[in-house]
Amino acid sequence: MRSYRVYLALLVVAAAIVGALLHPLALLLAISPFDPRGLIQFMEQARSAIADLLGWGVLALLAIVLLYGLGGRRIKHAGSPAHLDHRVFAEPKVAVAITAYNDAEATAQAAEDFRRQPHVVRVLVIDNNSTDQTAALAQAAGATVIAEPRQGYGYACMRGLAEGLKVREADVIVLTEGDGTFFADDLAKLLAYIEDADLVVGNRVVRGLIDQDSQMDHLFTWGNMTLAVLLRLRFWDGRHLGPAGLMDVGCTYRAIRREALERILPDLRVGGNHFSPHMLMVAMAHGLSVIEIPIRFRRRVGQSKGASQSLWKGLQVGLTMTWHIMTFNLKPAPPGSTGESTAQQGDQGAKARAGISR
Ligand SMILES: Nc1nc2c(ncn2[C@@H]2O[C@H](COP(=O)(O)OP(=O)(O)OP(=O)(O)O)[C@@H](O)[C@H]2O)c(=O)[nH]1
Ligand SMILES: [Mg+2]
């Protein structure tokens, strides 16, 4: 499935390049010594055929998106926030799960920073087959290191959430990345709202909070905002333009209440790079209240393993997220299954489909 989409995307890009080159080529031929009229006419016709094809293709895509969003594929959501029992925490206890893959230096620093935050009772580092010093340095920084053998960002996230639940005293489980992009002291912002919502996610598209040299360049900012619009269409709410009023779909820094996580964990099943919007959709399909709050975001430490590796990788992840948002349907997990087990059976093809980076 993934290779079919990749080839289709390549074909569209190639057609656009050919179409764009035909016009200047015709101009060059016009000043050549031989009579190029026949060839120029053919090139003009080819150019307008390609332009028509691409133009209509884009319109057709928009129509499909609208049909999915506004038509029968709209996902029913419970709509009423706070229908879970919202216990007010006197002093919330927090378990922080940090996903890590060959990010030794940044992960250890993140573990240390989070350990120092008020309310944090345990820092877990989910080591996803790192071959560098990630595990050793994280342990030295005071984190509990858990090895996740299934390679993939989503697998690391699901394991982190499942292990967070195992920390008995934790009322809130926080998911974050070990790449140095997030600020541990922004945790206070997430916790300020966890009294009012089941899931609080960070928003990395607020001007003034995002470092200019971070991965949130034009492509990522626009991409995330566009996908957020698509997600709003799938979970439509006329008054707030989507129940969560989302602006950003790919932010890993998020806090979830224990009882809310217990409810959605069995239904989380994406092992690849499109896990973040997946978790949002599962939460909303369960009727959880989700809110997004502005957080700071800075340049990554070390090499990217995800969408910012290259333009091509970014497009691949973006396409996979688009497909997943358009086709998402909550399939309830078999009774008695846990997030860890459904993740194992549920998305066997995720590696292949999501372009998991190693
Ligand atoms: N991409 C990826 N990340 C993983 C994997 N396993 C764990 N991770 C961790 O998940 C987080 C996300 O990966 P990143 O490389 O930060 O990807 P990204 O956030 O899309 O983009 P950058 O921050 O620019 O690299 C990091 O903390 C990784 O260390 C994996 O198999 N693939
Ligand atoms: Mg990252």
Image: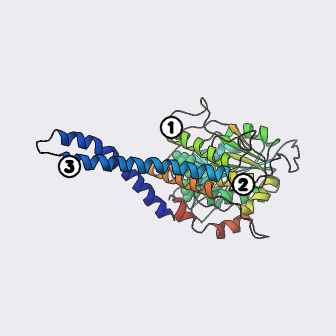
Of the residues under marks 1 and 3, which one precedes in the sequence?
Answer: 3
Q: Which residue is mark 3?
A: 38
Label 2 Cα neighbours within 10 Å, binned few <14 / some 14-19 / many ≥20: many
Residue 286 placement, left or right of 73: right
Label 1 beta carbon less than 8 Å to ligand 1: no
Q: Is residue 333 left or right of residue 57?
A: right
Task: Give the image location of residue 46, x and y in percent.
Answer: 32, 50
Q: Nearer the viewer, mark 2 or mark 1?
A: 2
Which tag, 3 or 2, sits closer to the chain's start?
A: 3
- Residue at 67 percent across and 45 percent down: it is 232
Which residue does the numbered mark 1 point to in the structure image?
Answer: 218
16 vs 169, nearest the viewer: 16
Query: Of helix, strand and loop, which one carries label 1?
Result: helix
Foreground label between 3 and 2: 3
10 Å crowding of disc 1: few (<14), some (14-19), many (20+): few
Q: Residue at x 27, y 40 (%)?
A: 24
Label 2: element kind: loop
Residue 209 position, x and y percent, is 61, 32
- Structural distance between the alpha carbons of marks 3 and 2: 54 Å
Q: Earlier along the polypeptide chain: callout 2 or callout 1? A: 2
Give the residue pinned by disc 2. Answer: 75
Other-residue count near label 3 (Cα within 10 Å), few / some / many at <14 / 14–19 / ≥20: few
Whether residue 176 is visible: yes
What amino acid is labelled 2 in the image? Ile
The quadrant in which residue 206 appears is top right
